[in-house]
Structure formats: C-alpha cells, structure tokens
Image: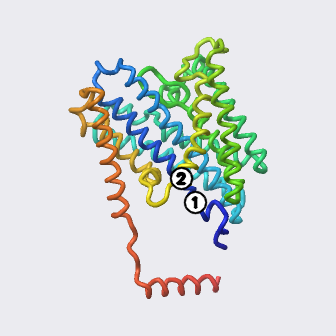
Amino acid sequence: MHPPAADTPAALHGRRGYLDWLRGVAVLIMIEAHTFDSWTRLEDRSRWEYGWAMILGGFGAPVFLFLAGIALALAAGSRQRRGVDDGEVVRLALRRGWQIFGLAFLFRLQSWVISRGPARGLLKVDILNVMGLAMLAAAVAWWAGRGTRSRALIFTGATIAIAMATPLIRATPALSVLPEPIESYFRSPPGRTTFTLFPWAGFLVGGAAVGLALDAARTVAAERRAIIGLTGVGLIVALGGYAASFLPPIYRETSFWTSSPTFFFLRFGILILALPIAYAWNAAWSGRSPLQEFGVASLFVYWIHVEMVYGVLSLPLHRALTLEQVTIACAAFALGMFALVQLKARVMKPRRRPLAAITKTTKTKTLFTSSS
C-alpha cells in the first residue's frame, strides 16, 4: 500500500481535521443542551435566553448524525480504493451499524443499573438507536447504487423522502397497532423520547450524500472546490427551508419544531454551511486543537456525561439552578469533561516498544507474508 500523495486531503488533513473540529463543537452543544435542560429551575425556563439555548442545543444531535453519514461515505470510498470489493464494503458498514445499535441498548442498561429507573426505559429510543438503524439503511442504499452519481441521487432522494414523509407517518393511525417500543421508532409517544427515525435518520442519509462529494475530492484543490460548492448548496437549502416556513403548511397536522419538512431543511442547510466554517477554521488553526480532541472522543463524552447530568450523581442540581448559575456550571462541566478526555488519552495511550522488539515483529510479519 502506497502512502498518500503530498497534495491529497488524507496527507494534509489526516482524519480531515475540520470534521473532528465540527464534531467537537457538537460535543459542546450537546453538553450545553443537557445541562440547561436538566439543571435549570422551572422559573427561569420562560426566559428568552433559555429558549435560545434550547434552539442552539437542538443542533447537537443533527450534527452527530450528519457527520456519521459523512464518515460512512468516506470510509466506504476509502475501502473501495484500497481494492475491497463492494460486498465487503457493505458488510463492514452494516457491521458498524449493528454495533452502534447494540451500544444503544448497552447504554440504556448502564443508565438503568446506575439510576434504577423504570424497566421500560431500557427500550427507550435515543440517538444511538436512530444512528445505528440509519447507518444500516445508508449501507443498503450505498450497495444499491452503482457509482458515485447514482449513490448521490439515492441518498438525496432518500433524504427528501424521509423529511416529506415525517408528518404523514406521525399522523397515521396504522402505527397504533404496534407495541409502544416499536412505535417509538416512528413517532414519539408524549413525554417518552425526542428521537424517531423520521425525520432524524434523514440527517445521516443526507450526510452520506455530502460525504460522497468530499470523497470524490482527491486533491486539496478539489476538496476546496467541493467545500465551495457545498456552501452554495447549503445556502440554497437553508434559505429555501426558511422561506417555506412562511408559506401555508401542506400538511394538516404538523409541528414546525418537530415534524415540519421546512424546519428539517432549514437545519440541514445550516449543517452543510457549517462545513466551510469548520474547514476555514481548521485551515487557520495551527497546533493542538482542543475541539478536535473533543471530536475524536465524542462517543466517550456522550457515554459518560449523560448519566452525570441526568442521573443520581447530580440529583441536587436537577431543576435547581438559575440560568446564570447553569451557564457557569455548564462551562465548568465542559472543562471537567475535557480533563477526563485527556486522562483517558493518557491511560489508553499504547506504550512504545523497544526497537529490538519492533524489528523482531516486523521480521516475523515479513516471514509469514512471504510464505503465504
């Protein structure tokens, strides 16, 4: 396997650092959303500052899903270029989707063991449930295409279909015959969950379409042109969604903040526009980036912080702080999370082996490779 050429995105950006930077921003938004939601006292929840904090917090999950879709497309394209056949590419993507879906139930089990909530909470639909199933669907969609263009059309069409079908699916009485844990994947029972496949899976599938555009950029110049092109696409989608919000709704029963296609496309356009901002910031930044480190450790932060914010560990803070106190507590909590990320990196850092051991291992690998 040859090393990447010096002018390729892989050579200059590694993991495409601007995606890790954007994921790090999403981690901060996630922490803000959860701390404000859990710790703000009832009297302060009617303040306009709290309302805007919740609107900002509503972008955390879409960013994670969007970036997961981009990562899926980038990983599939990278494997394909290394000579992995399409069947194996899809199998690996499906395996990752099942892993994420399984982690969702392990996460709920952990929360139940620590905080001892009702047993039905084990089947609550959360972002990992949606992400895992959406990754499975995206893997199948990738297999159905026969090239970048056809796959982009499939992903784009699926994104539009998911957004437009959301109000119809949430209003259909046919779902009432399903057991509640299954119904929750399609529409949210009151007070049960925020996440459903419709429309949340659309952010991941749409991210896969964007990922195909980035994967097609094999040089830094081509990647820059792709980012510029995506800026135009993001503006059109965001402005189109915003303009459509002033038109009469085409669905009888639609909530703008939950099931409206116009709100979905407004947010999706903003997600696309976040890419050039992240790209420009990453290009201007030199040296160590705490946000990138947060982004790389996003699953770890998610895994440990939810129980710390909502569980028994912070019980005295639940709905007990003023908005100003929550702001300070949120900043302190984010710093604490970053300290834990650093501690994890040090503990998990592999030890450097002596040169003799490395040489011996290399010779052994060469021997087995040449004999096979």
Q: Tag count in the figure?
A: 2
How packed mark 2 is, by other alpha carbons closer than 10 Å (few <14, some 14-19, many 20 or more), is many
Secondary structure of the residue carrying tag 2 is helix
Quadrant assignment, res 12: bottom right
Q: Position of residue 291 (x, y in %)?
A: 44, 50
Q: Which mark is residue 91?
A: none
How packed mark 1 is, by other alpha carbons closer than 10 Å (few <14, some 14-19, many 20 or more), is some
Side (left or right) of 113 relative to 196? left
Disc 1 and disc 2: Cα gap in Å?
A: 9 Å
Q: Position of residue 290 (x, y in %)?
A: 41, 53
Q: Position of residue 325 (x, y in %)?
A: 26, 31
Q: Residue at x 62, y 42 (%)?
A: 207
Q: Residue at x 37, y 61 (%)?
A: 345
- Outermost residue to the front: 284
Q: Residue at x 57, y 21 (%)?
A: 170
Side (left or right) of 47 relative to 99? left
- Please identify, in this view, whether the residue under mark 1 or under mark 2 is nearer the observer: 2
Q: Which residue is mark 2?
A: 282
Q: Which one is in front, 326 or 123? A: 326
Is residue 5 placed above or below 20 in the rendered structure?
below
Determine contact: label 1, label 2, CB under 8 Å.
Answer: yes
Side (left or right) of 15 relative to 79? left
Secondary structure of the residue carrying tag 1 is helix
- Disc 2 marks a residue whose amino acid type is Asn
Q: Position of residue 51 (x, y in %)?
A: 41, 23
Is residue 268 placed above or below 72 in the rendered structure?
above
Q: Residue at x 47, y 34 (%)?
A: 125
Q: Which residue is mark 1?
A: 13
Is residue 304 placed above or below 58 in the rendered structure?
below
